[in-house]
Image (tube, grey):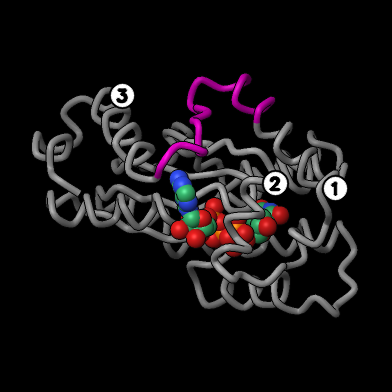
Amino acid sequence: MTADTPQHGLFLVLEGVEGAGKTTQAELLRHRFRVTEVAHTVSREPGGTRLGEGIRELLLERGELDIPIESELLLMLGARAAFIQQVVRPALERGEVVLSDRFELSTFAYQGFGRGIDLNEVRRLNRFSTGGIRPDLTLILDVPVGHGLARQRGAGKEQDRFEGGGDVFLERVREGYRTLSQEDERVLLLDGSLPSEVVHEEIVSLLAGRFPGRFPETFSDASG
Ligand code: T5A
């Protein structure tokens, strides 16, 4: 967040390698927000807007397209600019909790550490796309790469461009996430290999402890 950025809500992000459980946790939190009457917007990247969903389709589902890594980076950031302007900023100005399934750390981990694009350049371009809006808290669900991929196979999910990048690529991404978690106190690494309900309860108590007064008392004890 920057001084000239009006930001009254709370911006939360879930991150992690393929199959880490981000979507599962986002859905559990969405349910928790709903039953405890916390005004919220839950979304995902790339996506969340018509432009972003179009770019997502191009990047993830059109495996036959030859996309240079520079184009991949700029497409992700193009989607992000719309996501910030059309989803995140308005929801924060309404005072909501915004929860995003992936955000800028995905770009640092996948395009920076994974693809090998200079991280300073990635950060610079990313700042242009976000206008300086940053998450209040990013939770990385850490799982071994093979574990996450096995979960996705178990769920019958088809491989996309990034899963097809191979284990070595995804190991660099995972290591990237672990490095990034050590550089910023607003980024935390959680054990994503625990059962979903255990991870969910840990996230709930972490949010209640980290942002006192932001959530109703029922938030911490509402049953699933
Ligand atoms: N990307 C994205 C970039 O390269 N740069 C960027 O800037 C951005 C924003 C997006 C791709 O784009 C790349 C990264 C990605 O490759 P995606 O589909 O959004 O693709 O991301 P995936 O990680 O592929 O999403 P998935 O939905 O497949 O993984 P999730 O959300 O981490 O996992 P989830 O919750 O769907 O769970 C997968 C399976 O595991 C089970 C679930 O029931 C499900 O079957 N599961 C668990 N099982 C046991 N214990 C748990 N704790 C479990 N949690 C979930």
Name the residue tied to disc 3.
210
The disc label shown at residue 72, or none: none
Which secondary structure lies at badge 3?
helix
Q: Nearer the viewer, mark 3 or mark 2?
A: 2
Quick one: label 3 or label 2, which is nearer the N terminus?
A: 2
Quick one: label 1 or label 2, which is nearer the N terminus?
A: 1
Q: Is residue 189 magenta?
A: yes
How many neighbours does mark 2 have within 10 angstroms: few (below 14), some (14-19), or many (20 or more)?
some
Q: Residue at x 20, y 34 (%)?
A: 214
Picture coordinates of residue 47, whole percent (x, y): 54, 67
User: Would you identify the image quadrant in which residue 151 lies?
Assistant: bottom right
Name the residue tied to disc 1.
115
Stretch of the chain drawn in magenta: 178-195
Name the residue tied to disc 2.
146
Picture coordinates of residue 150, whole percent (x, y): 64, 54
Q: Is residue 15 magenta?
A: no
